[in-house]
Image (tube, helix red, strand yellow):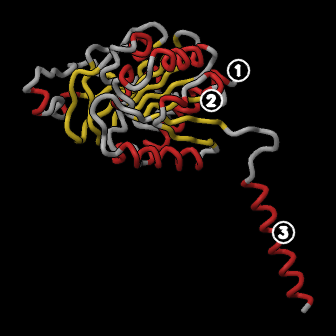
Amino acid sequence: MKRLSILIVLVALLFLFCDRSNAEEPGKPKLKVLVFSGTGYYRHPDIPVTNGWLVRLGAANGMEVDVTETAKDFTDQRLAVYQVLVMNNANELAKVLDEAQRKVIEDWYRKGGGIVALHAAIVHQLGWPWFNQLAGCDFNSDSVFQKARVIVDPASKDHPSVKGQEPEFWYEADWTNHDRSVTGLPGLQVLMRVDETTYTPVRPYFLDRGGKPMGKDHPIAWLREWDGSRFFYTELGHDLRSLDTPFGHQHISEGIRWVAAKSAK
């Protein structure tokens, strides 16, 4: 009986220790992230499941993630509680957000809010000049989902969003061709490029409409510190297959943390 009592006490202490070890640091608020996935152009079928994936990714990394497609949520008061805005394939936003709502985002960003853009979030954004300038480019065409050789920029190999990857590795995704290369833009750091000789860069739909590959300099992920805060873009995210991998988890969670670091200063 005495041994049983001792065993019960030991088990209780074990549970207490585990509970404390998994708890948040006292007084440390969670990083608050808002995901927006409203679209004015083509709507990717995987947007809803990617939204769910982002919520789970946040929970696994100590972040509180909310999702909206309501433009009216973009007010100074509502956006002020978030450190990061993730645009999940939110394309042609001039058709989704009015001028006042776009200005709320611009002002929030200049105060230190960070923006993460996934895949088609820089598609057809010429109607929002500020965001187009922030991203550095717009959309030309894309490929089908296929494996290609990815090259980590040597200057970026220690950035947390790519750290630990081989200098060159193979990865599957839908690869986007932009209307210009962002290499060399002020405050911009390329993380990765894709080797267009290892896949077919323009799918037939866009070949028939004048789509063009980018050539040797095809950035697929980059960072930018510009106009007061931080921006992170990745071509990954057309569908969940390109995100729900060990590298996809690292790449997006660390991208979110990087842009959030500005608001924490």
Q: Of label 1 and label 2, which has the lower sequence position?
A: 2
Please tell me whether residue 111 is drawn above or below residue 58 in the rendered image.
Answer: above
- Say what amino acid the circle numbered 3 marks: Leu
Q: Residue at the location (30% across, 40% down)?
A: 44
Depth-wise, is mark 1 or mark 2 nearer the camera?
2
Left-right relation of 264 to 160: right
Q: Give residue 124's position: percent from left, percent from top.
A: 30, 21
Q: Which residue is mark 2?
A: 78
Q: Give residue 194's position: percent from left, percent from top.
A: 29, 28
- Say what amino acid the circle numbered 2 marks: Arg
Question: As rendered, which of 169 and 246 lies closer to the eye?
Answer: 246
Q: Residues within 10 Å of mark 1 (few under 14, many from 20)?
A: few
Q: Residue furthest top?
A: 186
Q: Of label 3 and label 2, which has the lower sequence position?
A: 3
| Mark 2, secondary structure of its residue | helix
- Say what amino acid the circle numbered 1 marks: Lys
Q: Which residue is mark 1?
A: 265
Q: Residue furthest bottom?
A: 1
Q: Which residue is mark 3?
A: 13
- Distance from Cα at disc 3 to Cα at disc 2: 42 Å
Left-right relation of 213 to 183: left
Looking at the rendering, which quadrant does residue 140 occupy? top left
Q: Residue at the location (22% across, 30% down)?
A: 142
Q: Say if residue 108 shows up in the picture.
A: yes
